[in-house]
Amino acid sequence: MKVKAILFDLDGVLLDTEKIYHKYWKQAAAEFGYDLADEIFLRLRSCDSSIARRIVDTAAGVDGAYDRIRERRKELMKDSAQKDGFELKDGVIEFLSAIRDLPVRKAIVTASSLEKKRAVLADLGIADYFDEIISVKEVPRGKPFPDVYLFACEKLGLRPEECLAIEDSPNGIRSAYRAGTRVVMVPDLTGPDEELAGMCTVVGRIDDCLRLIN
């Protein structure tokens, strides 16, 4: 079936921010005295807050640990953004330029707050490439639940099978796959295991998507 829309995850696909999130999750946890394994923080990528809270509180052995760590992580991220800003992932501008005039809709489907990221996209000069920017804040449940991708398809007036989702994290891949879209994984901090690879049409670079939409 012809691809009629491309749905982009934001952090880790368009923005080179996952490594920053990872750094400050770890720092915030350490400041509270929680010695948590890297694997815990990797599981938080694009994760619904109710699931993330259970993961962190269980690992820390303390109720409320997630909320305390998250608030401190947000402070650290804000300071970092004000000082250093954000960067695009390699190949993003070239890919967006290549698809700009193609007859496909383009939307961002993100776990991030829209208010903050709209300004980032404008500063980086890519805001005008997209028809819609959709946040999990607009749906009851975040990734890995399918809600946000189903909502994105509905907002674009398309069936999920007409859409191609580009994701980097396990939670994002599961969300898009469960919604019924085709999925391209562009690995960032981790690659796919066998289960995730089976959910993906392609695993590779962002420009590998071109052969799926031309």
Image: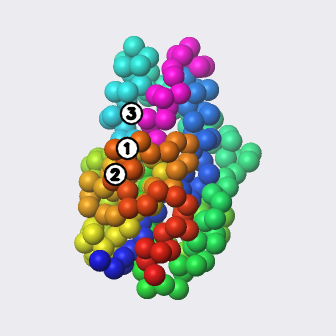
Do the CB atoms of the residues marked 1 and 2 lie less than 8 Å apart? yes
Query: Which residue occupies 53% across, 27% down?
Result: 38
* Residue range of the region highlighted in magenta in the rendering: 30-45
Circle 3 residues within 10 Å: few <14, some 14–19, many ≥20: some
3D distance between C-alphas at marks 3 and 2: 24 Å
Tell me the kind of residue under disc 2. Answer: Gly
Tell me the kind of residue under disc 3. Answer: Ala
- Camera-nearest label, 3 or 1: 1
On the rendered structure, is 165 left or right of 188?
A: left
What residue would you read off at disc 2? 198
What residue would you read off at disc 1? 194
Residue 137 % position (x, y): 37, 52
Q: Is residue 54 visible?
A: yes
Residue 116 % position (x, y): 55, 54
3D distance between C-alphas at marks 1 and 2: 6 Å
Q: Can residue 10 be seen in this view?
A: no
3D distance between C-alphas at marks 3 and 1: 23 Å
Q: In this view, does 39 lie above or below 206?
A: above
Residue 79 % position (x, y): 67, 40
Residue 146 % position (x, y): 28, 53
Q: Does the magenta stretch include residue 98?
A: no
Residue 162 image-quadrant placement? bottom left
Q: In this view, does 141 lie above or below 42?
A: below
